[in-house]
Image (cartoon, helix red, strand yellow):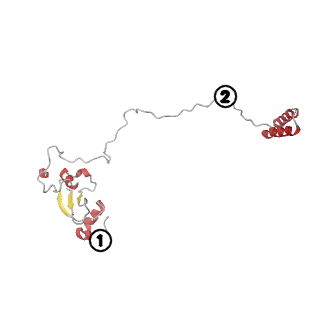
Amino acid sequence: MSTILRTLRNLRRIGFKEYGHQMQNIGDTKAGTLIGKDRFGNKFYENLEEELPLRTRWVDYKEHEFDPSQIEPGWHAWMSYMVDKPPTHDPLMQVGQRVWEPKEHRPTLTWSRSGFKTYSTTKHKYSAWVPEAKPRQSEEPVLQSTPMSEMDVREAKQSIYNDVQYQPTSDSSRDSTMMACLSTLQ
């Protein structure tokens, strides 16, 4: 983007209409000398005094929907600083349309709706991996808990109490064993 002073100076030189056109197309204001026009209607400018190096040449495309392939080869060489003389001053570049060049320009359609798109007409050479997990088989049977009625709980407690009561152990260890067994049932 230009400084405010440079933008105002270029606005005074090029006028409001060209200022609006440049801001819409290139986003900057540039004042320069018209060097030439190609067969597509594009205008080529140059300003060696005020522009930065390698930004002294620019093109004003005829079409709003422009494509860089719309520049002729001679003008492309001049725009890219490959040659110093523009095609209007170089006798080798003034040949005109060559025999091998197409009569009408064919734009690059890569990013347009008419661009080439591959079709999925062939079978895929690969397939997606789908993991298949087998159910686990344990060596021990899994005990499934079922809800016990109040009567079943009372009978289980009584059988544990009877088993613990008849073991030949001391009273303190018997009580702790019985309490541990009873706590597992609750």
Neighbor class of circle 2 (other Cα within 10 Å; few <14, some 14-19, many 20+) is: few
Q: Quadrant of residue 183?
A: top right
> How many numbered callouts?
2
Left or right of 133 on screen, residue 168: right
Q: Which amino acid does label 2 sit on?
A: Glu
Residue ranking furthest to the front: 170
Dot label at residue 41: none
Residue 55 rendering spot, x and y as whole percentages: 25, 60
Residue at x 25%, y 61% (from the top left corner)? 53
The residue wearing badge 2 is 139
Neighbor class of circle 1 (other Cα within 10 Å; few <14, some 14-19, many 20+) is: few
Residue 79 rendering spot, x and y as whole percentages: 22, 55
Q: Name the image quarter holding the C terminus.
A: top right
Local SS, label 2 = loop
Q: Name the image quarter holding the N terminus.
A: bottom left
- State how far apart marks 2 and 1 are (Cα): 87 Å
Residue 168 rendering spot, x and y as whole percentages: 88, 32
Q: What residue type is labelled 1?
A: Leu
The residue wearing badge 1 is 5
The answer to whether 44 is drawn above or below residue 117 in the figure is: below
Residue 174 in view of the camera:
yes
